Amino acid sequence: MEFAFKAHGHPNVTSQHRSTLEVTRDQDIGKTADCIIGVSADSVMEDIPSQMKMALKKENTIIKLILKTENAQDEISGHGHPHLTLDHPTDMVCRTSNYTCSRTLMIRANKAACDLDPILIEDLKDGKVLEVKIIIDESHE
């Protein structure tokens, strides 16, 4: 099961946060937004198909997030959880912790913003397009 959308980089992307990474529908971010790697997302949580949301809410679901720019690609793996509401109107957050809220897409992620490929981050600082793909490994559901 896959869901893909696009976002954009921003000059204020620093990608220094050690426990989260975020893609947002917001068009602008400040320099302190060190977890946000993509802005102006053309999809949000409410756009994720309901069948996929049901799978994301299972603890044993393995979630992969593929991030791709013109010059680089990175992959994050994490887990679903029954407490995920998946209904935030603007933000999608991957967390290395077990914390859940309306912004959380996955928990126990193997990477945060600070762990991403430096070439990917440079592309994002230059405002390049970010292709985002959410993949659920259905064999682990």
Image (cartoon, rainbow, N blue to C red):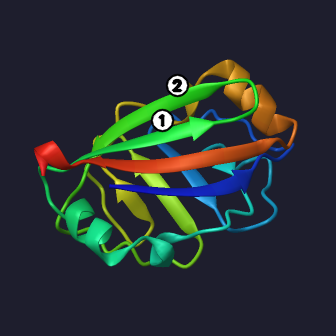
The picture quadrant where one finds residue 89 is: bottom right
Query: Label 2: how many residues lie within 10 Å, few (<14), some (14-19) or many (20+)?
Result: some
Q: Looking at the image, which is closer to me, 19 or 40?
A: 40
State how far apart marks 2 and 1 are (Cα): 5 Å
Q: Are marks 2 and 1 in contact (CB under 8 Å)?
A: yes
Image location (x, y in percent) of residue 23: 60, 55
Which residue lies at the image location 65% right of the left edge and 35% below the top edge?
A: 15
Q: Secondary structure at mark 1?
A: loop
How many numbered marks are there? 2
Image location (x, y in percent) of residue 62: 23, 44
Q: Secondary structure at mark 2?
A: helix
- Quadrant for the N terminus, please: bottom left
Image location (x, y in percent) of residue 102: 40, 73
Q: Amino acid at mark 2?
A: Asp
89 displayed left or right of 125: left
Which residue lies at the image location 48% right of the left edge and 35% below the top edge?
A: 112
Which residue lies at the image location 42% right of the left edge and 78% below the top edge?
A: 87
> Can residue 36 be spotted in the picture?
no
Image location (x, y in percent) of residue 70: 76, 31
Q: Amino acid at mark 1?
A: Ala
Which residue lies at the image location 34% right of the left edge and 52% below the top edge?
A: 106
Residue 115 - label: 2
115 displayed left or right of 101: right
> Can residue 93 be spotted in the picture?
yes
Residue bearing mark 1: 112
Q: Is residue 19 placed above or below 57 in the rendered structure?
A: above
Residue 120 - label: none
69 displayed left or right of 75: right
